[in-house]
Image: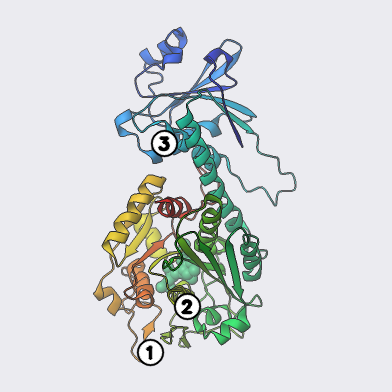
């Protein structure tokens, strides 16, 4: 998608969308009787998400509501812009007219570009009659340099999110752990180093967690490590750790077949990490960052790990596997340990970890857990600025107790069934993160959607925008 900037009058705008604040006829339309009447009759008031079409000379013009200015947030703007651009269906070119608002022109530009890229994305790769995206160009009717700067930033971020979605939408028969490692390798160069460990190397590293989970599949696991040194030499890196289960059948503790197809998205965390590492390189992030992605396929077979098995992880700590479907935390135990071995002094892990998080927060909010107040505060701030909604859920020594092992160090499910599953899952990972400042993002509810709305069906790229905003700080 291209963006162009020209300050033209509304009558010269191509397929124009005019964005309006609630209750105020926009300046460009003050002399248009039709528009004035729409507002005075309250047929169109400019509420968020409201759309109306009116004839304007030869063409049709779309009015799109943004709501009350004081209630506007960056996140709401992204949605309103995206939905309106998407509603202007079938058009190759769309002109947009924007009001001046308090958030500032740069934020408006960023929201416009992000919204347009995210809302018009659709995964068409495997459709034999796939059509190229209709919308090719957005002409922004302004020549403000801060608006332009915002659009450039927003467009880049939109591309990183859509890169994540492209990877995540790949089905399990294509996106094996080896395939994912190949995709990661394509990112190498320009200062980004990519290292792939295969199953033989993982055995030498004593990565019993990743190997245990991957054992039942013909497609052996991979640990992918990406290193970006944009900071000072010797500066300890921030680690981004991703759960990359390319398909989660549950293993021997097999899942019900309904909706099992959705478990191809169980690699969403790792895809977000790959996208953030791509952003490190392309945005020239001035920090040292390492990405650690644990890819494995969780299947039942004669060679699978089984309930009651014990696995010894890279850290030397042992896990009693009581349910093979709680596999995310098992692969993350090794990935987190590897991040620590690289000297990371901050860790953020992203994982489609628990159904319990989906029950608690649904598809709007990502669940956030942390063992460090200042780190958490900084990250939540960045997330809010990025347009992603996240909500803190508790860690607690009582929850940690529920995953403590009896004969082994930890067990992979809680001793108390059906309670606080997102927190006990987080405490399991906490056991491996230890005192290293750490944030766990449970993106089980936010990483994909089955109901097309702002996002089309499939992967959403959850976590990518928040990570990039945090990296840029
Ligand atoms: N990948 C799933 C979690 C999940 C389920 C994400 C549904 C999104 C939608 C994870 O591996 C899993 O199966 N978790 C179990 C853990 C339980 C056995 C302790 C769960 O949440 O049921
Ligand atoms: Mn599972
Ligand atoms: Zn899983």
Secondary structure category for the residue under label 3: helix
Ligand 1 under 8 Å from disc 3 Cβ: no
Q: Mark 2 sits on what residue?
A: 334
Q: CA distance from mark 1 to mark 2?
A: 16 Å
Residue at the spot of label 1: 408
Q: Secondary structure at mark 2?
A: helix
Q: Quadrant of residue 436?
A: bottom left
Residue at (53, 59) in percent of width and height:
277
Image quarter of residue 198: bottom right
Quick check: 19 above or below 420? above
Tell whether label 3 touches label 1 (CB within 8 Å).
no
Residue furthest bottom in the image: 407
Q: Is residue 311 above or below residue 280?
A: below
**Residue 460 rendering spot, x and y as whole percentages:** 51, 51
Q: Nearer the viewer, residue 247 or 194?
A: 194
- Front residue (pair 300, 318): 318
At horizontal 61% and vertical 37% (from top left) the residue drawn is 1
Image coords of residue 169 (percent x, y): 60, 56
Question: Closest to the observer: 16 or 279?
Answer: 279
**Neighbourhood count class around disc 1 (C-alpha, 10 Å): few under 14, some 14–19, many 20 upward:** some
Residue 259 image point, x, y percent: 53, 61
Question: At x 41% / y 86%, what residue is drawn?
Answer: 317
- First in sequence, mark 1 or 2: give its number: 2
């Amino acid at each position: 998608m291209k963006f162009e900037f020209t300050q033209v009058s509304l009558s010269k705008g191509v397929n124009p969308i005019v964005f309006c604040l609630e209750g105020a006829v926009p300046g460009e339309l003050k002399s248009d009787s039709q528009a004035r009447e729409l507002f005075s009759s309250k047929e169109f008031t400019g509420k968020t998400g409201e759309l109306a079409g009116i004839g304007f000379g030869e063409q049709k013009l779309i009015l799109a509501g943004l709501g009350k200015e004081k209630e506007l947030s960056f996140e709401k703007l992204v949605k309103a812009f995206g939905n309106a651009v998407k509603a202007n269906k079938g058009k190759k070119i769309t002109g947009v007219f924007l009001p001046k608002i308090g958030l500032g022109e740069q934020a408006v530009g960023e929201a416009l570009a992000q919204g347009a890229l995210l809302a018009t994305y659709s995964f068409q790769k495997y459709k034999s009659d796939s059509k190229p995206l209709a919308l090719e160009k957005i002409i922004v009717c302004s020549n403000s340099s801060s608006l332009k700067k915002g659009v450039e930033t927003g467009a880049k971020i939109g591309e990183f999110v859509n890169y994540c979605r492209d990877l995540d939408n790949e089905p399990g028969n294509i996106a094996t752990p080896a395939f994912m490692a190949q995709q990661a390798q394509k990112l190498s160069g320009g200062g980004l180093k990519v290292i792939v460990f295969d199953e033989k190397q993982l055995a030498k590293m004593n990565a019993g967690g990743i190997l245990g989970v991957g054992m039942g599949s013909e497609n052996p696991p991979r640990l992918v490590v990406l290193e970006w040194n944009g900071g000072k030499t010797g500066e300890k890196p921030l680690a981004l750790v991703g759960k990359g289960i390319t398909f989660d059948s549950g293993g021997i503790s097999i899942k019900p077949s309904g909706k099992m197809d959705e478990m191809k998205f169980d690699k969403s965390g790792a895809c977000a990490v790959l996208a953030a590492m791509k952003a490190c390189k392309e945005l020239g992030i001035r920090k040292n960052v390492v990405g650690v992605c644990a890819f494995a396929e969780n299947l039942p077979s004669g060679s699978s790990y089984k309930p009651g098995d014990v696995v010894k992880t890279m850290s030397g700590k042992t896990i009693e596997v009581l349910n093979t479907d709680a596999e995310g935390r098992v692969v993350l135990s090794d990935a987190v340990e590897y991040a620590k071995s690289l000297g990371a002094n901050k860790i953020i892990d992203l994982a489609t970890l628990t159904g319990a998080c989906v029950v608690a927060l649904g598809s709007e909010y990502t669940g956030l857990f942390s063992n460090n107040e200042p780190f958490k505060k900084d990250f939540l701030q960045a997330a809010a600025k990025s347009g992603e909604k996240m909500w803190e859920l508790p860690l607690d020594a009582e929850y940690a107790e529920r995953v403590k092992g009896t004969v082994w160090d930890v067990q992979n499910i809680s001793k108390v069934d059906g309670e606080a599953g997102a927190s006990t899952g987080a405490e399991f990972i906490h056991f491996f993160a230890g005192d290293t400042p750490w944030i766990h993002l449970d993106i089980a509810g936010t990483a994909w959607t089955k109901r097309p709305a702002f996002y089309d069906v499939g992967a959403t790229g959850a976590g990518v925008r928040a990570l990039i905003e945090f990296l840029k700080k």
